[in-house]
Image (cartoon, helix red, strand yellow):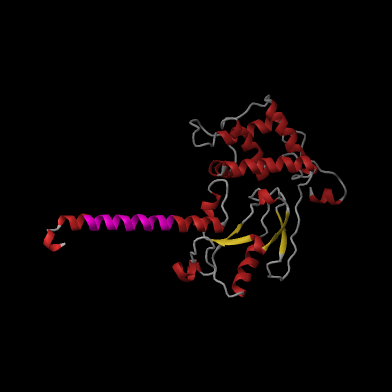
Amino acid sequence: MAWLKRMGFQVKAIKNPDWARDEIILACHLVMENSWKGLDAQDSRVAELSTLLQLLPIHPEAERNEKFRNSNGVARKTFDIATRHPGYQGKPTNGGVLDVAVLHDFLSRPEEMAEAARLIRQGIARGELQAFVPPEDEDFSDDYSAPEGRLLMRRHRARERNKALRKKKVTSVLQRGGQLACEACGFNFERVYGDRGAGYIECHHVLPLHVAGEGRTKLSDLALICANCHRMIHRRAPWPTPAELGATIEEHQASLHTESTATARQFNRISEDSLPEDRR
């Protein structure tokens, strides 16, 4: 097939390409909106999604045959997803590993995944979906920035993360004499885990990319936080900033201290009351 293409022939695929993650996100979102049930090929929502998937610029025309993402194929994919739902009692259809992975993402992060589906649809409508190669440089100041947030087809997140940014953020902190400690709670992986924790910290976008959209992210827009605080921030909207979460932690700890002190005083009073008067 390759040599025919080199000779100038247009070779059409016999088998359609596997579903990409962004395609499955759209299908899974449809299944979720249908109460986690598969949809028939005659359903108008399946026809609409079929048309939408054919507009996605993921698979070249040469890799598509005449049945590419038609209503029958889309309907079959919705059942592949629905029958993998934990609440499904029957025998699951064939489907693929990626179907299960996306389904689990929807079950654990429904709001985030629904937003991803919306962004994909929006990107198709505006014709903005395309990949790019981020530039590399050695600037580690807070003014350093790199492009982020553009919707990609083959990435596991709704919006693109520039991997170099985390490394540059960590390097920036270390070069200034700082430590890799959580900006919310102060947890230091190396201090607790020794060599195993050395150099480890998670990087968080203070303004979520799905809110900021496509643009350039400065190092000052990022925060280094521990895994627990990262989870707590993303647990539900509205997302607190690391500083706000830190304030919540301090407030809670102060409340616990006050309760503990009050309990201790009450215990002391009870103990004193139980003693004879000459021993108080």
Asked whether, in this view, residue 105 is left or right of residue 51, the answer is left
Quick check: 138 above or below 207? below
Residue in view at x 62 percent, y 40 percent: 114
Q: Using the rendered view, name the quadrant where residue 106 is placed.
A: top right
Which segment is the magenta one?
A: 252-269
* Residue drawn at 53 percent across, 34 percent down: 92
Q: Is residue 190 left or right of residue 149?
A: left
* Residue 215 shows in this picture: yes
Residue at image location 72% in from the left, 61% down from the top: 146
Asked whether residue 253 is drawn in magenta, I would say: yes
- The percent coordinates of residue 172 (x first, y second) are 63, 70
Q: Is residue 199 magenta?
A: no
- Percent across and percent down for residue 14 are 74, 39
Q: Please, is residue 221 above or below residue 23 in the view?
A: below
The extreme right residue here reads 8
Across and down, in percent, residue 37 comes to 57, 30
Which quadrant of the view contains residue 54?
top right
Kindly tell me whether residue 164 is visible in this rendering: no
Q: Quadrant of the C terminus?
A: bottom left
**Residue at x-position 33% and y-position 57%:** 260
Examine the residues drawn in magenta and state their main secondary structure.
helix
Q: Position of residue 259 (x, y in %)?
A: 35, 54
| In front of the other: 165 or 79 | 165
Q: Nearer the viewer, residue 224 or 106?
A: 224
| Relative side of 9 to 51, left or right | right
Q: Is residue 3 above or below residue 47?
A: below
